Image: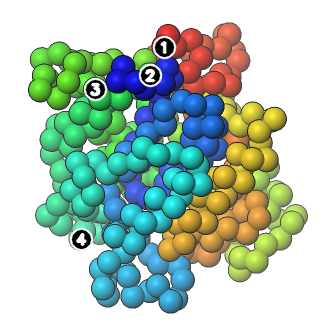
Amino acid sequence: MNGLPARRLLLVHAHPDDESINNGVTMAKYAAEGAHVALVTCTLGEEGEVIPAELAHLAPDRDDTLGPFRVGELAAAMKELGVADHRFLGGAGRFRDSGMMGAPQNARPGSFWSADLDEAAGYLVEVIRELRPQVLVTYDPDGGYGHPDHIQAHRVATRGAELAADAAFRPELGAPHAVAKLYWNRVPVSVVEEGFERLRAAGSSFPGLATPDDVPGVVPDERITAEIGDEGDATVLVAAKAAAMRAHVTQIAVDGPFFALSNDLGQPLFAREYYELAAGRSGAPAGERERDLFAGVEA
């Protein structure tokens, strides 16, 4: 297996910072345990809003240099999580951030939303066949909250996994490989409600509060099939996640156990991360949640 560790995890995200918010604890945990953790980011996040006033010139309607700056933020965040293998789909800048749903940028030449699905998925097939991950993590079909790049990342991840296992698809990209388990990022509604209760009780430096509706991927508790965040390592893992989020300085402000995006509305920084198994077989007993994404997977 080209000298790779026995356990191999691949995450597919739309923009730099999505990985730290959604999976920072998970990535830090498995990296520390010696698994091969690889991240594929589909765009540079060129259309993001910029929080610090001194960096406002990076914005797409000014210097339009936010994308390259966010490449550096992502590298710094991955260092905090202990993840050495982070890549951009098709290479940095292959696909551009599409902006929010309905924005003119959706149809901009080169936007990720307008990309041909099999062409984009082909770049992921090459990664899957090289790294041969047993576990793949991405968004649900709605991308968590309807952002076009998140939806497209879901489609590319799903199609990429399908094509990577098909020996007839572009054999020059490597030997076929079937991903054993595919997970979607989720948050149980009870955890979201409890998190906002804590935020209201503790207060924070943010001028306002987000609402549970602002949290992507929230579902009824019974849909959660896995949760990650071992109690023994919780402090270290959460600290790594918070540090990774802080590294995305243009996009995230962190205040203790809470954070805010460019809207300056506080929301909980989740110390545990949750998933729904979308394909593959659970390694937990019936009715129980997995505590290891590799549960039941053969090396």
Say which mark, if any, is on residue 56: none
| Mark 4 vs mark 3: in front | 3
First in residue order: circle 1 vs circle 3: 3
Q: Say which of 197 and 270 sits in front.
A: 270
> Disc 2 to disc 4, how far (Cα)?
38 Å
The residue that appears at 53% across and 79% down in the rendered structure is: 51
Q: Are marks 3 and 2 in contact (CB under 8 Å)?
A: no
Point out residue 264 in the picture as x, y percentages from the top left corner.
62, 76
Q: What amino acid type is highlighted by mark number 4?
A: Pro
Label number found at residue 134: 2
- Mark 3 packing: few (<14 Cα in 10 Å), some, or many (20+)? many
Badge nearest the viewer, 1 or 2: 1
Asked if the residue at tag 2 contacts the one at tag 1, i.e. Cβ–Cβ closer than 8 Å, the answer is yes
Q: Earlier in the sequence, mark 4 or mark 3?
A: 4
Instruction: Evaluate whether residue 220 shows in this view.
Output: no
Q: Position of residue 109 (x, y in %)?
A: 14, 64
Residue 228 picture quarter = top right
Would residue 204 be visible to someone looking at this image? Answer: yes
Q: In this view of the protein, which residue sits in the foreground, 219 or 12?
A: 12
Q: CA distance from mark 1 to mark 2?
A: 8 Å
Under circle 3, the secondary element is: helix
**Image quarter hosting the N terminus:** top left
Tell me the element at label 1.
loop
Residue drawn at the location 63% of the way across and 31% of the way down: 33
Rounded to the nearest angstrom, the CA distance separating label 4 from label 1 is 45 Å
- Identify residue for label 3: 129
Residue under numbered circle 1: 299
Image position of 36 with respect to 22: above or below: above
